[in-house]
Amino acid sequence: MQQVSTISGARLLDSIDAPAMLSQVERWAAINSGTANLTGLAAMAGDLADAFSALPGEVTLEEPAPVTAIAADGREVVKDHGRHMVLRVRPDAERRFLLTGHMDTVFPVDHPFQSLTWLDADTLNGPGTADMKGGLSVILAALSAFERTAEAAKIGYDVMVNSDEETGSLSSAPLISTLAQGKYAALTYEPSALPDGTLAHARGGSGNYSVTVTGKSAHAGRNPQEGRNAVVAAAQLAVALKALDHAGLSVNPARIDGGSANNVVPDHAVLRFNIRPRSTEAAEGFQTAFAALLAEISSELDVTFYVHGGITRPPKPVDARAQKLFDLVKACGAELDQTLNWQNSGGVCDGNNIAACNVPVVDTMGVRGGSIHSPHEFMIVSSLRERAALSALVLQRLSVGAPL
């Protein structure tokens, strides 16, 4: 690779304080910040704001956008979220980047997985170590190293750390979209797709739906024919939705709430399901098929449907500009003696939202680790330093004109 920087990968590595990064991750992982734990999220947001204030620019805590959900009884209720941290650096620069992460974890305040355990000298087990409090430390260390380069003064960047990624980023999606506008490139700090550092490449999309079914109650013995069974309608819809599965789309009916006493025809049910379209065409095809199913079953069983939700993570293909960014990350890794490859992923993240804004993004720039979303989650500690150096070098290359 042509050497166009004023600082080598080795010097970048030397500028990164790995023990300080580890201490930071241990402190953050000790804070329970499950998506619904607003107290824990507030503590994390405050700690992050203090830590990122060491960088130039302005740190703000942004209010979450309003979000509603469907309760088991069919009511649409407000769902509270924590605030999102944003750092804006040199907002008037001609070339600007976006770096994103999340402070929430999948472990609620009453989950038994709350402590850190060393599995060996280089492997730390703990909630959020890989997903993604380790990644947050990588962002901060990478930017601190990058700010020591001559090129940093010429460009700007925004950092966004949201509080709701694990539940779909519904309260931060407008913020992500706003911050992505006009950015040259983006990096997101989910953990590597595999413990060896493999990156996630193309991603499918994701959508969550709640369908409220309203029928008509009746006595199950005296006049069942006058009833309209909402549970049966929900079950029929669930089976029909599952039949829409194909190579480009998976549908997962996940839960039915509703029902009544055994001698009552139930007039209410709520079906919840998730879809994973692998392309925009598959997503559009599902919407058409779903509308047809609702009309058909509504007519056949004389029930009504109310749909809440939709596709919140569009599919993320890798276009030519995004591929150039992947190639640049791989080349920077080689300069640091890191062998990087990539593979497609069925998972989703904020990289999907960023790509939908036509910004090239690599979204697994965080630590190496694995077993995320389980009590076996682990972080490979030596990857803190190596991934911070990788990001700093990528940002430097992008700053001096690496074309995308």
Image (cartoon, rainbow, N blue to C red):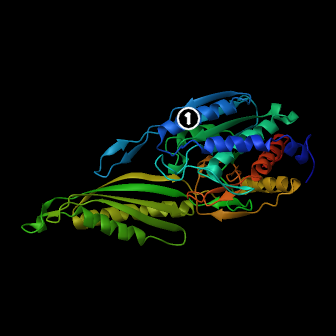
Residue 305: x and y in percent read 30, 56
Q: Residues within 10 Å of mark 1 (few under 14, many from 20)?
A: some
Residue drawn at x 45%, y 53% as measured from the top left? 310
Tag 1: residue type? Ala
Quadrant in the picture for residue 18: top right
Residue 63: x and y in percent read 51, 32
Q: Is residue 242 visible?
A: yes
**On the image, numbered disc 1 is attached to which residue?**
43
Residue at the limit of the structure toward the left, as seen here: 222
Q: Is residue 392 left or right of residue 62?
A: right
Residue drawn at x 60%, y 57% as measured from the top left? 372
Q: Tag count in the figure?
A: 1
Residue 34: x and y in percent read 51, 46
Residue 329: x and y in percent read 79, 53
In the image shown, does 325 or 395 lie closer to the viewer? Answer: 395
Q: Is residue 185 visible?
A: no
